[in-house]
């Protein structure tokens, strides 16, 4: 059994679909967090999921914008740790707006020629989890 | 400050008010002939357009205002690589209102986010062309007296035609409208219009392939062009194109008070012999477009109260 020590303050992201952890690492820009320790556990055994990934992040608890996790997979469990204890479990929901995480692929969109523009998507259909580009309203299909 | 990016930016009540104003302007042009005196409209057209630009310019001139602008990206600072947001910041200090056409979708929205003056989307690629939809709505209301209780046939390229999508989106907010969607199978209305707009609104509609099969039941026939480049093979195009040429023979099957509309330019989908038919309303429609743009300029500049 692989052992990774507990964390004093930060997050444990549990029930990540196996294989998705590196993508989440990139989305949350965890590589840019200075002085923070990140442990990624891949293909851990899970009674519920068969296999899952887990990410442990030792960081101040206001250091990460977790809204984007709701977009990636709202089944992820977010445990918030303070003083070595789980103090909260956050429920995820689909964010109404996503900024600078995904890019519009429509070649006719203004963002295709003006690259300094923020890439903004809004939640057009919560039931079908459809996001559309704020500028051209093209559906994002690359999730 | 208010902008116009999509026809859905206005509620039904606001649209009614706008069309009431357009009707008053049409009936009493002299009362409005100097309401925009001292005001300037910038027409920022990054791609060529004849009707839309001239319609906007005519609208502002009719209101006593003046116009300035450019009519292609080559003759603007965009050719030097200036961003839309920088251009609109500068234009904001030259003019009081801006009409923008741009080949890239969403460009007018970017402009509105950085503008100090109202921005009107005058067409952004295949995305939105709200003043065409306002023109269509105003023409129907003006010539029929109401935007409800009618059967409208939309004919031609219903897959790629943005004017059709936009018109359906705007019309589903009005009661008792039947839709007859007339197109070849290859150019049927996309599922997001069929399911997310028509079905979601509970609007009755049917899809047919032959214009002759439907024309007799229509109050409005909205024609669009079937474009050769949309077909995978020439044979299909040749088979379909004559289905959608509106001529005298087909007009004989139509009701006496049916109206024929077309966003123009017309190529060959409406035979010139139909032009003299009193039911041909497409040139009137272009004229109505000036009045609704006048009403829009007056509204966005907040000048509605200036007329006593």
Image: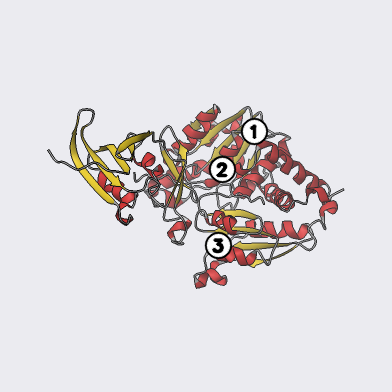
Tell me the crowding category of disc 2: few under 14, some 14 to 19, or many 20 or more residues within 10 angstroms, Cα based: many
Q: In the displayed image of the protein, which residue is found farthest to the front? A: A83
Residue at figure coordinates x 69%, y 33% from the top left: B256
Which chain hosts label 1?
A: B
Q: Which residue is mark 1?
A: B219
Tell me the crowding category of disc 3: few under 14, some 14 to 19, or many 20 or more residues within 10 angstroms, Cα based: many
Q: Which residue is mark 2?
A: B166
Cα separation, mark 2 vs mark 3, equals 26 Å
Q: Is residue A14 visible?
A: yes
Q: Please name whichever residue, B70 or A64, is drawn nearer the observer in this view of the structure.
A: A64
Between discs 1 and 2, the one toward the N terminus: 2
Which numbered disc, 1 or 3, marks the residue closer to the eye? 3
Which chain hosts label 2?
A: B
Residue B40, x across and y down, in percent: 72, 63
Which chain hosts label 3?
A: B
Residue at figure coordinates x 60%, y 55% from the top left: B122
Residue at figure coordinates x 51%, y 46% from the top left: B161
Q: Which residue is mark 3?
A: B85
The circle on residue B13 is none
Mark 2 in CB contact with mark 3 (< 8 angstroms):
no
Q: Please name whichever residue, A57 or A135, is drawn nearer the observer in this view of the structure.
A: A57
Q: Secondary structure at mark 2?
A: helix
Residue B76, x across and y down, in percent: 57, 70
* Residue B51, quarter of the rendered image: bottom right
Q: Secondary structure at mark 1?
A: loop
Tell me the crowding category of disc 1: few under 14, some 14 to 19, or many 20 or more residues within 10 angstroms, Cα based: many
């Amino acid at each position: 059994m692989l052992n990774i020590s507990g964390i004093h303050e930060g997050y444990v992201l549990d029930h990540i679909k196996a294989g998705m952890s590196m993508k989440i690492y990139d989305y949350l820009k965890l590589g840019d967090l200075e002085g923070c320790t990140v442990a990624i556990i891949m293909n851990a055994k899970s009674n519920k999921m068969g296999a899952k990934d887990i990410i442990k992040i030792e960081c101040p608890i206001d250091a990460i914008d977790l809204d984007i996790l709701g977009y990636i997979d709202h089944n992820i469990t977010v445990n918030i740790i303070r003083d070595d204890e789980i103090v909260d479990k956050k429920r995820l929901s689909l964010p109404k707006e996503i900024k600078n995480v995904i890019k519009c692929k429509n070649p006719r969109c203004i963002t295709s020629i003006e690259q300094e523009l923020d890439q903004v998507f809004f939640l057009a259909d919560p039931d079908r989890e459809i996001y559309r580009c704020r500028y051209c309203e093209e559906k994002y299909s690359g999730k | 400050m208010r902008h116009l990016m999509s026809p859905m930016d206005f509620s039904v009540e606001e649209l009614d008010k706008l069309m009431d104003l357009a009707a008053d302007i049409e009936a009493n042009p002299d009362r409005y002939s100097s309401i925009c005196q001292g005001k300037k409209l910038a027409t920022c057209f990054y791609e060529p357009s004849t009707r839309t630009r001239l319609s906007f310019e005519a609208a502002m001139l009719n209101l006593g205002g003046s116009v300035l602008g450019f009519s292609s990206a080559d003759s603007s600072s965009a050719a030097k690589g200036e961003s839309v947001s920088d251009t609109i910041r500068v234009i904001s200090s030259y003019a009081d209102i801006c009409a923008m056409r741009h080949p890239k979708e969403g460009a007018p929205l970017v402009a509105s986010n950085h503008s100090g003056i109202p921005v009107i989307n005058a067409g952004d690629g295949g995305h939105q062309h709200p003043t065409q939809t306002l023109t269509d709505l105003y023409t129907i209301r003006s010539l029929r007296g109401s935007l409800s209780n009618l059967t409208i046939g939309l004919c031609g390229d219903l897959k790629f035609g943005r004017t059709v999508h936009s018109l359906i989106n705007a019309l589903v907010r009005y009661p008792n409208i039947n839709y007859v969607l007339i197109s070849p199978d290859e150019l049927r209305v996309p599922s997001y219009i069929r399911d997310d707009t028509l079905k979601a609104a509970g609007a009755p509609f049917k899809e047919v392939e032959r214009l002759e099969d439907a024309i007799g039941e229509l109050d409005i026939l909205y024609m669009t062009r079937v474009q050769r480049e949309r077909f995978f093979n020439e044979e299909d195009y040749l088979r379909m194109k004559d289905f959608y040429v509106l001529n005298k023979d087909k007009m004989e099957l139509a009701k006496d008070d049916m109206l024929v509309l077309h966003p123009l330019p017309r190529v060959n989908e409406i035979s010139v012999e139909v032009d003299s038919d009193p039911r041909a309303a497409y040139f009137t429609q272009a004229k109505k477009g000036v009045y609704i743009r006048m009403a829009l300029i007056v509204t966005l500049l907040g000048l509605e109260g200036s007329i006593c």
